[in-house]
Image: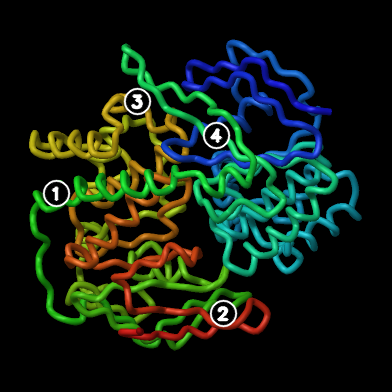
């Protein structure tokens, strides 16, 4: 049966859809250009958002939905249920197996889904021990467990390593023969081969200053492949990147440190049940920018956590940071003062009820929220950042009320606002629409080219490689046989 949307209006979220028909056998891609309005479709179709006007026919009773927003909600629930204080060990949350079983019919289906999403070897792992990519696979397994007639995937490849990106594409091709797919993405190369049609949203600003996202006319996949919008968006993102760089260059210059800026000697992280890595010797000199690469769950974020100081084993390792051995009397705040961070872990931790402006201001104080009075200069700069990110209208809006992509963009601004010596970027683009992803990529590459900050960068996507980065840390091997860490400086 076809899905016919005569009219769907959710004004509180700026969403308007009129005259959209999804015929039986069609699979649609929703391309996120200027915003993530497409992400709201999953929330509306599944009842998470109530539309003021809803004239929809043929919507299936069983709808599977996977999104970064939904993933964030589950992580927050797991944190709320943390029983560490009542146990003689750390509570890492519900096991992968139990989370999949929550939505399954029987044990046989659980086993099939764990195999289908490559989670068998992680079945007893706690949810909060998983990498972003592993978490995404859990969310997919839970969505498939309800045997949906319509599957809505919002940025389905986000956080997945290359092998699992390929596996997902093959799985979607198989699923397309028995259910309908809606794929929401900001990446033009992430529309699976089964997609038959593509639609976008147009943004318009009302006289009251509100942004309305209206569904544009759909097109066939063949029409999409020759559509001129990509060239226009790339040009616009380059222009905006230049504006961001002008703002960054107005800021203070960071202090200078002798080489090495960072050094790890024979670094090792080991738990009672697993060795994560060992014998890592990594030296970062001034003017060097590094990309950390490897599959999901190999230890990339753990390695960065040693440098940042957020990992409990950072003090049991030989680490030099900004000219001082870790543990030689410096406070964690003295270290973080010189570091900017963007990561899914930080995004999860940022659960306080503060405004968009306060999120940017918190970058000056390395805090979650603002607990001291900022200077007028800092407030003015934060407002300039809101303007440059096209978010001035959100100045007083609560962080929690913003969509996932807006939240991530603010956290990137928070990391950049103080122009840190070291900029740690762990999958920074998750949730960003096309133009903001290109904007951030262009800006980061220019920061690296002009050595305004030292970049430590993680991304699984080949097209996210920054031309200015020539140094790499690679995790080689697999989860069953262990990973070797290879450090390569000045690679061609």
Q: Which residue is mark 3?
A: 397
Label annotation for residue 38: 4
Tell me the residue at 23%/61% (across/down).
446
* Residue contact at pointers 4 and 2, CB within 8 angstroms: no
In terms of depth relative to the viewer, which is nearer, 461 or 482?
461
Is residue 217 depicted above or below 91 in this figure? above
In terms of depth relative to the viewer, which is nearer, 187 or 23?
23
Is residue 310 depicted above or below 372 in this figure? below
Tell me: 370 left or right of 206: left
- Looking at marks 4 and 1 on the same chain, the residue that comes earlier in the sequence is marked by 4
Q: Quadrant of the C terminus?
A: bottom left
Is residue 339 depicted above or below 393 in this figure? below
Q: Which residue is mark 1?
A: 246
Q: CA distance from mark 3 to mark 2?
A: 44 Å
Crowding at dot 3, Cα within 10 Å, few <14 / some 14-19 / many 20+, comes out as some
Tell me the residue at 40%/55% (across/down).
428
Which mark is in front, 3 or 4?
4
Which mark is in front, 1 or 2?
1
Q: Which residue is mark 2?
A: 275
Tell me the residue at 63%/69% (across/down).
163
Q: CA distance from mark 1 to mark 3?
A: 26 Å
Q: Position of residue 452 (x, y in %)?
A: 17, 63
């Amino acid at each position: 049966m076809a899905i016919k949307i005569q009219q769907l209006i959710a004004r509180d979220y700026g969403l308007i859809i009129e005259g959209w028909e999804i015929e039986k056998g069609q699979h649609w891609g929703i391309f996120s250009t200027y915003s993530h309005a497409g992400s709201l479709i999953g929330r509306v179709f599944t009842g998470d958002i109530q539309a003021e006007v809803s004239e929809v026919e043929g919507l299936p009773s069983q709808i599977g939905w996977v999104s970064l927003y939904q993933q964030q909600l589950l992580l927050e629930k797991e944190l709320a249920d943390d029983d560490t204080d009542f146990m003689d060990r750390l509570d890492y949350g519900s096991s992968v197996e139990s989370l999949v079983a929550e939505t399954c019919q029987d044990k046989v289906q659980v086993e099939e889904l764990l195999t289908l999403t490559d989670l068998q070897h992680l079945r007893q792992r706690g949810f909060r021990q998983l990498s972003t990519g592993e978490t995404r696979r859990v969310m997919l397994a839970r969505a498939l467990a309800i045997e949906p007639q319509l599957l809505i995937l919002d940025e389905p490849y986000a956080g997945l390593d290359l092998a699992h990106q390929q596996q997902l594409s093959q799985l979607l091709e198989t699923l397309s023969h028995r259910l309908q797919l809606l794929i929401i993405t900001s990446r033009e190369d992430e529309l699976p081969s089964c997609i038959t049609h593509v639609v976008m949203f147009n943004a318009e600003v009302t006289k009251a200053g509100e942004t309305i996202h209206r569904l544009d006319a759909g097109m066939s996949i063949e029409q999409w492949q020759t559509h001129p919008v990509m060239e226009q968006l790339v040009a616009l993102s380059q222009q905006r990147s230049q504006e961001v760089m002008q703002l960054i260059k107005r800021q203070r210059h960071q202090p200078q440190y002798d080489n090495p800026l960072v050094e790890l000697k024979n670094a090792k992280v080991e738990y009672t049940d697993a060795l994560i890595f060992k014998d890592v010797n990594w030296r970062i000199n001034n003017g060097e920018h590094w990309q950390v690469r490897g599959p999901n769950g190999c230890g990339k974020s753990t390695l960065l956590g040693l440098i940042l100081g957020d990992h409990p084993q950072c003090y049991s390792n030989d680490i030099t940071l900004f000219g001082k051995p870790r543990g030689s009397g410096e406070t964690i705040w003295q270290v973080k003062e010189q570091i900017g961070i963007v990561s899914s872990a930080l995004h999860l931790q940022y659960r306080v009820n503060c405004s968009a402006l306060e999120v940017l201001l918190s970058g000056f104080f390395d805090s979650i929220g603002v607990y001291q009075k900022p200077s007028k200069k800092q407030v003015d700069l934060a407002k300039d950042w809101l303007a440059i990110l096209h978010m001035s209208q959100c100045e007083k809006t609560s962080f929690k009320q913003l969509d996932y992509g807006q939240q991530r963009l603010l956290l990137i601004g928070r990391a950049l606002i103080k122009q840190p010596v070291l900029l740690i970027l762990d999958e920074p683009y998750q949730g960003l629409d096309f133009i903001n992803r290109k904007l951030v990529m262009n800006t980061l590459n220019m920061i690296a080219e002009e050595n305004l900050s030292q970049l430590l960068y993680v991304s699984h996507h080949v097209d996210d490689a920054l031309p200015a980065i020539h140094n790499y840390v690679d995790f080689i091997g697999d989860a069953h046989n262990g990973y070797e860490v290879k450090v390569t400086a000045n690679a061609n």
